[in-house]
Amino acid sequence: MKNKVRQLFRDKLVLVMTVLGLLTIVAAAGTVKIRKDNAQDGRNPYLDVPQTEGILAEEMPQNRLEENDGQAETRAQVAGSSDASYSVNNRDEADQKPMEEESSLGAGAAAARALSYNGTDRLSWPVQGNVILDYSMDSTIYFPTLDQYKCNPALIIQGDVSEPVAAPAEAQVTEVGSNEEIGNYVVLDLGSGYTAVCGQLKDVQVAQKQYVAKDTILGYVAEPTKYYSIEGNNVYFELMHDGEPVDALDYLE
């Protein structure tokens, strides 16, 4: 009896093992078929998981001031030398100034926009005084303070400290600057290629791109710079046509 029970148990165990084996074979065959079908479709049978290791946050852009380094430097150039030059801004850009701002420029602003000077009308003197150093670009003249001879592109006109300095004609202010030779200066576009420079100023009353009428106060006579200490108080007045110095005496009243 015990032998029959044992034989029956063995037969059942074999049957269970056989069934499990068949199920394993069927499952394996199904997996192979699925992988084969996915391979034919060109799809990855496995789930793609994005790699997160080593991903860095995007760096913030560097300060733009470094990219523009040097662009905001002062453009004032040595005005007293014979090769002096000044920047003259495009008048078309200045014409984009709002209309309400134009009304604050005072009488004559609309006429100044025409920049009517043509080189034949007489200019007003910026100050009434003697010419200390005359214009001389064809030969050199003696500069007492510098104790040297050099060409002079301007008139050095005597003036009293704090005396008002006037615009020689209707004009647009294209530059307001300063350098150690002629101190504070104002550059004026008179029209028709004529440009005037008034230097040795203090308390400048005008701003860049502003239109001014003839005899408008630009500023006041300042103490002379170290380049003109012996010559005394003066106004530096230079007139240029198409960027080249001309003798201002030929154009003044």
Image: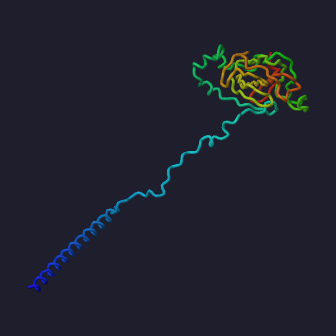
Q: Which quadrant holds the C terminus?
A: top right
* Picture coordinates of residue 129, whole percent (x, y): 84, 17
* 231 up-or-down from 103: above or below: below
| Quadrant position of the N terminus in the picture | bottom left
What percent of the width, then of the height, locates residue 58? 51, 49
* Quadrant in which residue 35 is drawn: bottom left
Q: How many marks?
A: 0
Q: Identify the residue at image location x=77%, y=31%.
A: 179
Which of the 4 image quarters holds residue 207? top right
Q: Is residue 207 left or right of residue 181?
A: left
Instruction: Return the residue nearer the eye: 9 or 206.
Output: 9
**View extreme (front): residue:** 2
Q: How is the image coloured?
A: rainbow
22 to the left or right of 230:
left
Residue drawn at x 59%, y 41% is: 64
Residue sitting nearer the eye, 242 or 85: 85
Please tell me in which quadrant of the rendered image residue 205 appears: top right
Query: Where residue 80 sits in the image (x, y, percent)?
Result: 81, 30
Q: Position of residue 181 (x, y in %)?
A: 81, 30
Which residue, as the protein is rendered here, is positioned at the far left? 1
The residue that appears at 83% across and 18% down in the rendered structure is 159
Q: Image height check: is 141 above or below 35?
A: above
In-front residue for pair 29/42: 29
Q: 197 or 222: which is nearer to us?
A: 222
